[in-house]
């Protein structure tokens, strides 16, 4: 077929052929709902995403449902597909995406939005929902962390899934099947879908604006809820988890087995959307995790097992779990990876477990260079915590540490930037004090990203630092970090600026997004394809000010474009934390005292698992 003829002409053809071990291809005659699980980035990124792996296994475990994977083709493959009239297709069957009942996009990153439009177009599906008519199929849905502010994509998506998809998507599937059997059109179906908790149907909401460009009101249709509350899996210990992962046919970003320790986070860092949006905390029992991990290793042949969460070292029974897993992994030469460790609870016992099979680099996230600024962001971590953790690691043989910081945080000054350099210098000094082998040398990698205020966080009111100023601060840091054994990486400020625009944007940005895409923008998260000039031209063409979205600090009473979307954490709690930030006051973590954020009400009994 034509596809087989073009594959030798593109980079990494293994991305596009399917047929991987543990992939699932069902008999079309035995299914009545076909779902295209679309990830708006390349195969290597999408195949590494744990949420997609869970949903792929869950959907294919259902009778009468088939789920196939769809990834964004790299530009060389896209050019070949367009030249030869090949539509975007499902990886398992190679059937065109337009022939599926439902196409579901996973929204992990704002700079993937142009890829969503590009994939729809490459599939032969009109990008705007109003141009797709009233036919039920294909239904275009989307979920993931970016769906907590769905408005910039509202003109293109039929239904957004708010929160965790394991349960609510099954209710959506059942409704779709009934609508299909009953011959319903899309409009009638959407009116019914809006009544399912956790589903947001943007066509049923009218947005009005004030003269200054801010949102005046968000008005739902009569049959749509005023606020769409996220869905969660309440009993996480009994939640579906796959016993098999699809084994990739080429190298991917995270080529390993993963088990999910818990959802949510006890910490409450004020910049972190995941730490607030994934509340309340729900954990799995060690025996559940052990069973799931061992099944994945047996079924896949992965050589690394990762214990995944927002803060792995906060899992109460981590050490006995590691002991149990290591007794299984060591004979098989499978390493145990513990990402997302905190420096304030990283000790010698945990280090010894992490290095049993093979050492990897250690990563810590101080976030800010001074204690003052760490208190502002509620990062309850001291420099001594970090230095003690590094000393333990260096004495145990590590010689590679990564430190993550952010620039442009609220109230940041040059003194805070000086602190980043001082921390890096002191970490190198701790290596000299504690290493047993100075001949190997040490590498301290400092990474600094550009702070992006996100919805549903205490910093959602805060404006970004202007581009020129953030670029000055990055240059200031580059000069300060000319330190032996220290490597500095920074994220391009213009990417972070555009991310901030769409993170807190409203529905009017749909026209900017479409204009930029039609002018050639795609893979905006990849530096080699990012075209900032095209984006700024799109804003001018559409008559919108980009600074209005990125740089403006919001007032206490302003209506946000996402105010009709609830993650369970109340706006009053977030505002209280915002005020505490500017007083330099920290808040206790959930294990020390309940902050009354509101998320626990999503659980029966109202108590989370912190």
Image: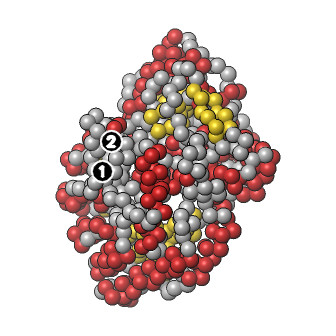
Q: Say whether residue 428 is left or right of residue 610.
A: right
Who is closer to the viewer here, 362 or 194?
A: 194
The quarter of the picture where the N terminus appears is top right
How many circles with numbers are drawn on the protein?
2
Q: Which residue is drawn at 36% across and 73% down?
A: 382
Residue 373: x and y in percent read: 47, 69
What is the secondary structure assignment of the residue under circle 2? helix
- Whether residue 543 is situated above or below residue 370 in the rendered picture: above
Quadrant in the picture for residue 105? top right
Q: Residue at x 29, y 81 (%)?
A: 395
Residue 140: x and y in percent read: 58, 31
Q: Say whether residue 158 is left or right of residue 312.
A: right
What is the secondary structure assignment of the residue under circle 1? loop
**Decide: marks 2, 1 in contact (CB < 8 A)?**
yes
Q: Which residue is drawn at 27% across and 42% down?
A: 607
- Whether residue 356 is situated above or below residue 292 in the rendered picture: below
Looking at the image, which residue sits at the far right? 541
Looking at the image, which residue sits at the far top? 182
Q: Say whether residue 384 is left or right of residue 191.
A: left
Between disc 2 and disc 1, the foreground one is 1
Who is closer to the viewer here, 57 or 549?
A: 549
What is the C-alpha distance between the residues marked 2 and 1?
10 Å
Q: Earlier in the sequence, mark 2 or mark 1?
A: 1
The residue wearing badge 1 is 594
Residue 389: x and y in percent read: 32, 74
Task: Identify the colour scheme used.
Answer: secondary structure
Residue 472: x and y in percent read: 65, 74
- Whether residue 565 is situated above or below residue 178 in the rendered picture: below
Q: Which residue is drawn at 64% across and 33% down?
A: 207
The residue wearing badge 2 is 600
Res. 1 in view: no
């Amino acid at each position: 077929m034509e596809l087989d003829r073009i594959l030798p002409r593109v980079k990494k053809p293994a991305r596009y052929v399917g047929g991987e071990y543990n992939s699932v291809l069902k008999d079309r005659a035995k299914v009545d709902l076909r779902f295209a699980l679309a990830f708006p980035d390349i195969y290597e990124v999408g195949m590494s995403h744990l949420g997609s792996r869970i949903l792929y296994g869950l959907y294919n475990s259902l009778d009468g449902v088939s789920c196939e994977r769809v990834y964004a083709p790299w530009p060389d493959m896209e050019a070949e597909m367009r030249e030869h009239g090949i539509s975007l297709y499902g990886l398992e069957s190679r059937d065109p995406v337009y022939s599926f009942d439902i196409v579901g996009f996973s929204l992990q990153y704002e700079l993937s939005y142009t890829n969503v439009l590009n994939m729809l177009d490459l599939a032969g599906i009109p990008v705007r929902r109003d141009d797709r008519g009233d036919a039920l199929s294909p239904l275009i849905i989307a979920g993931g962390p970016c769906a907590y502010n769905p408005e910039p994509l509202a003109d293109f998506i039929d239904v957004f899934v708010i929160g965790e998809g394991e349960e609510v998507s099954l209710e959506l599937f059942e409704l779709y099947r009934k609508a299909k059997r009953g011959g319903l059109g899309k409009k009638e179906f959407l009116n019914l879908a809006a009544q399912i908790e956790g589903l947001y149907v943007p066509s049923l909401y009218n947005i009005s604006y004030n003269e200054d460009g801010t949102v005046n009101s968000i008005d739902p249709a009569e049959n749509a809820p005023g606020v769409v509350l996220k869905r969660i899996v309440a009993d996480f210990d009994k939640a579906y988890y796959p016993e098999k992962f699809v084994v990739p046919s080429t190298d991917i970003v995270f080529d390993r087995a993963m088990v999910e320790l818990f959802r949510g986070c006890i910490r409450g860092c004020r910049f972190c959307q995941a730490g607030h949006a994934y509340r309340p905390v729900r954990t799995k029992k060690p025996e559940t995790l052990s069973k799931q991990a061992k099944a994945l290793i047996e079924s896949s042949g992965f050589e690394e097992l990762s214990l995944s969460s927002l803060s792995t070292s906060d899992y109460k029974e981590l050490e006995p779990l590691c002991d149990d897993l290591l007794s299984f992994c060591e004979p098989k030469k499978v390493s145990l990876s513990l990402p997302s460790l905190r420096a304030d609870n990283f000790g010698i016992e945990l280090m010894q477990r992490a290095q049993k099979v093979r050492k990897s680099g250690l990563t810590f996230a101080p976030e800010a260079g001074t204690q003052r600024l760490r208190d502002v962001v509620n990062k309850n971590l001291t420099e001594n915590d970090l230095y003690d953790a590094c000393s333990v690691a260096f004495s145990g043989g590590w010689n590679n540490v990564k430190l993550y910081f952010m620039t442009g945080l609220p109230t940041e000054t040059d003194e805070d930037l000086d602190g980043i350099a001082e921390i890096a210098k002191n970490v190198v000094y701790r290596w000299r004090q504690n290493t047993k082998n100075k001949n190997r040398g040490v590498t301290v990698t400092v990474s600094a990203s550009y702070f992006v205020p996100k919805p549903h966080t205490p910093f959602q009111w805060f404006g970004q630092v202007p581009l020129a100023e953030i670029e000055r601060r990055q240059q200031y840091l580059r000069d300060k970090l000319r330190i032996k054994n220290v490597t500095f990486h920074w994220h391009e400020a213009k990417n972070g600026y555009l991310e901030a625009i769409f993170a807190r944007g409203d529905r009017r940005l749909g026209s900017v997004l479409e204009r930029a895409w039609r002018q050639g923008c795609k893979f905006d998260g990849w530096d080699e394809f990012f075209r900032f000039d095209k984006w700024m031209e799109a804003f001018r063409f559409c008559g919108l000010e980009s600074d209005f979205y990125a740089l403006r600090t919001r007032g206490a009473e302003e209506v946000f474009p996402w105010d009709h979307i609830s993650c369970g954490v109340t706006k009053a709690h977030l505002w209280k934390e915002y005020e505490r930030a500017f007083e330099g006051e920290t808040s206790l973590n959930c294990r020390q005292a309940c902050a009354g954020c509101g998320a626990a009400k999503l659980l029966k009994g109202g108590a989370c698992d912190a």
